[in-house]
Amino acid sequence: MTIKADDKSFLVSFETAVLQPIRINNKIYTKVTNISGESTIIGKKPYDIVRQSCAYYGSTFQQAKQLSKDTLGNYLKLPIVVAHDYGNPFILIPLLSPKSDLNVWFSLKAIERLEASEGGCTVVLTNGEKIMVNSSTVTLSKQVGFANLLNTHFLKRMSRLSHNEFLTSRNQFFQKSFQD
């Protein structure tokens, strides 16, 4: 595991699987695990990393939260779209209140499955790593379901942008050409 306790410029990416808070000498740091299984300790709280990543990728945390509310309704602990690449969204799922120092964030694409375990739930990542969390399987399943709905909504929105508008303007162009 790499320790970058002074790295203030860290941003999430499509390779990010989990942001977990860890306490070192009474200070909250973030253990970032990539989809490859590699872990790094970053000298910022998970919420600060998510907030700064949203800003870097062209949005704000508040806008990402509002998109989720508009799409899914006014629920607590909604997943957010942090960024997207060619219409492919990067969605993070919070286990607790996003601003909580104890909140863990999971990338939707990094979750392979959920397993009930004593005292909570085990999240099995696509890389095979298992992370025990203090949340019920039912609660986490609901949040993963919300994240999948957000993903579907976002993909439909991007599809409309790339296909319908192109086809509409193209059809209008061809109709106008034939009328002339």
Image (tube, rainbow, N blue to C red):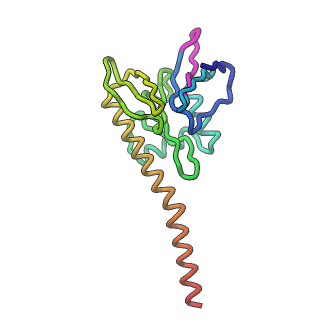
**Residue most extreme to the top:** 25
Q: Residue at x 43, y 27 (%)?
A: 96
Where residue 93 sits: x, y (%)? 45, 34
Task: Answer left or right for 146 relative to 47.
Answer: left
* Figure quadrant of the N terminus: top right
Where residue 168 sits: x, y (%)? 52, 72
Q: Residue at x 58, y 40 (%)?
A: 60
Give whichever of 179, 130 is nearer the camera.
130
Does residue 160 sit above or below 112 in this rendering?
Answer: below
Does residue 12 sit above or below 63 in this rendering?
Answer: above
Give whichever of 24, 2 is nearer the camera.
2
Where residue 56 sits: x, y (%)? 65, 39
Magenta stretch: includes residue 32: yes
Magenta stretch: includes residue 148: no
Give whichever of 4, 28 is nearer the camera.
4
Give whichever of 71, 84 is nearer the camera.
84
Question: Chief secondary structure of the magenta span?
Answer: strand
Count numbered badges in the picture. Answer: 0
Q: Residue at x 48, y 46 (%)?
A: 67
* Figure quadrant of the C terminus: bottom right
Does residue 158 sit above or below 143 in this rendering?
Answer: below
Q: Quadrant of residue 119?
A: top left
Does residue 69 sit above or below 94 in this rendering?
Answer: below
Question: Which region shows up in magenta?
Answer: 23-33
Task: Answer left or right for 109 relative to 48.
Answer: left
